[in-house]
């Protein structure tokens, strides 16, 4: 399936009228510099191109909430920059984005609110300034993880004694 056929399929699912669909596909494909490749089979796309296509397909129906898992993986620096700017503008215009990332510097720069989760346990959450205080997000994360490791090691030692 080609990129354009895939985007039209997604637009069909959401019932996007032809004129709106064409305008949105053109706008997002131009934004993410994928326009010239939409006629190619998706199987020929690089990982980054597939990531761009996935982002575009998620935007076609003009959602108010976007959920993304590691959205920057595979993107070249320019595409990552464009996506970051888009995400900030989307939220500034009233939308909301939940996204997971292991790149804490990106989270620190983009996020208004944050949750740090490890092993399914919520370690910290709140607005960025409350969570990180005067430290970097990376420093806070490492402190929280180190505290858990110390607690786990202490419990393991106590279990060995029993």
Image: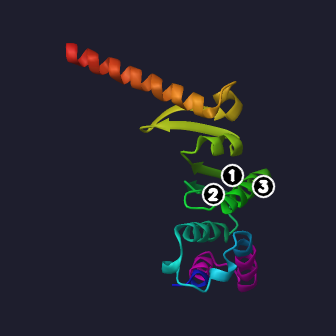
Q: Which of marks 3 and 2 is nearer the N terminus?
A: 2
Residue 55, horizontal then vertical, whole percent: 62, 66
Residue 97, horizontal then vertical, whole percent: 65, 52
Q: In this view, does 135 lie to the left or right of 48?
A: right
Label disc, if present, on residue 89 of the rendered structure: 3
The answer to which of 73 and 6 lies nearer the viewer is 73
Residue 98, horizontal then vertical, whole percent: 61, 50
* Residue at image mark 1: 96
Q: In this view, does 31 lie to the left or right of 149?
A: right
- Would you say the residues marked 3 and 1 are in contact, meaning their CB atoms lie under 8 Å apart? no
Residue 122, horizontal then vertical, whole percent: 50, 34
Q: Label 2 neighbourhood size at 10 Å, few (<14), some (14-19), many (20+)?
A: some
Cα distance between the residues tagged 3 and 2: 13 Å
Q: What element carries label 1?
A: strand
* Residue at image mark 2: 66
Q: Is residue 3 visible?
A: yes
């Amino acid at each position: 399936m080609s990129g354009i056929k895939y985007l039209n399929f997604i637009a069909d699912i959401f019932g996007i009228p032809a004129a709106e669909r064409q305008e949105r596909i053109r706008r997002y494909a131009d934004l993410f510099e994928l326009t010239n490749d939409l006629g190619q089979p998706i199987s020929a796309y690089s990982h980054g191109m597939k990531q761009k296509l996935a982002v575009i397909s998620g935007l076609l129906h003009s959602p108010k909430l976007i959920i993304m898992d590691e959205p920057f993986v595979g993107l070249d620096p320019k595409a990552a920059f464009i996506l970051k700017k888009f995400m900030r503008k989307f939220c500034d215009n009233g939308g909301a984005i939940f996204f997971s990332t292991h790149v804490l510097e990106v989270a620190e720069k983009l996020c208004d609110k944050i949750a740090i989760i490890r092993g399914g346990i919520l370690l910290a959450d709140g607005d960025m300034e409350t969570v990180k205080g005067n430290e970097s997000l990376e420093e806070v994360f490492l402190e929280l993880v180190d505290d858990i490791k110390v607690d786990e090691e202490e419990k393991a030692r106590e279990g060995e004694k029993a």
